[in-house]
Amino acid sequence: MNKYPKLTKDVIKSLKDEGVLIEEEYYLYPEKQRSPKADIIIRKDSNNWIAVEIEETQTHPDTNILKYWEFLEKNKNLSLKLIQILGRGFVEGKTKKGNYVSRVNNCKFLKVKMEDDLNGRFKYVLEDLKDHGFNCCEDYRAKREEVKDKIIEIIMKNSH
């Protein structure tokens, strides 16, 4: 867990404190040298999982969706809901360069393609913290506890 940004670590701790059974830094392809990881996995049962990606530092959220396509292709018995939360790093790092809208559109495009291609085994929820009233850097520092609570609320609301 040492590579997580502080906010993600705090969210993981709070979820555990609330009794949510999670796995953190779950390696999707343990056989690969540099396997992509899921930030958080919640197993509803052996065949229905929820993955959470908190884009606190990631500036390419679309790549975090793509890694689940291959994972589900290799694990045909699984259904997965991905909850992706766009946070500070993504918003702060790319809005000035104009990539923000493009990356969000890529996420929405992948949602449609993957839900169709994977025959209902993939569901996708995209939440942007800007839509919840948090603005870039200032809010993440000044309202850290509120941001964490909002992320937990989003996860809990979509974990059904």
Image (cartoon, grey):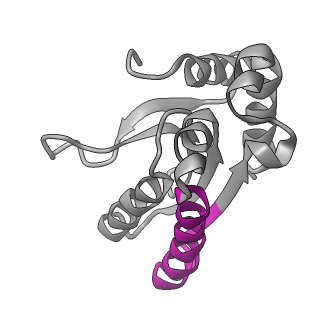
- Relative depth, front residue between 123 and 142: 142
Give how far across and how far down residue 102 sits, in percent.
55, 66
**Position of the N terminus by quadrant:** top left
- Residue 34 vs 49, above or below: the answer is above
Q: Residue furthest front?
A: 96
Give how far across and how far down residue 48 sits, in percent.
56, 57
- Please report the residue visible at 77 percent of the width from the left and 25 percent of the height from the top: 139
> What is the magenta range?
99-124
Q: Residue furthest right?
A: 133
On whether residue 59 falls in the magenta region, the answer is no
The answer to whether residue 87 is left or right of residue 18 is left
Report the number of numbered marks: 0
On whether residue 110 falls in the magenta region, the answer is yes
The answer to whether residue 76 is left or right of residue 149 is left
- Whether residue 77 appears in this view of the structure is yes
- Residue 57 vs 7, above or below: the answer is below
- Please report the residue visible at 61 percent of the width from the left and 30 percent of the height from the top: 21
Q: Secondary structure of the magenta portion, mostly?
A: helix
- Please report the residue visible at 35 percent of the width from the left and 63 percent of the height from the top: 75
- Please report the residue visible at 56 percent of the width from the left and 31 percent of the height from the top: 22
- Whether residue 42 appears in this view of the structure is no
Give how far across and how far down residue 18 sits, in percent.
75, 21
- Residue 42 vs 62, above or below: the answer is above
- Relative depth, front residue between 69 and 22: 69
Give how far across and how far down residue 149 sits, in percent.
80, 26
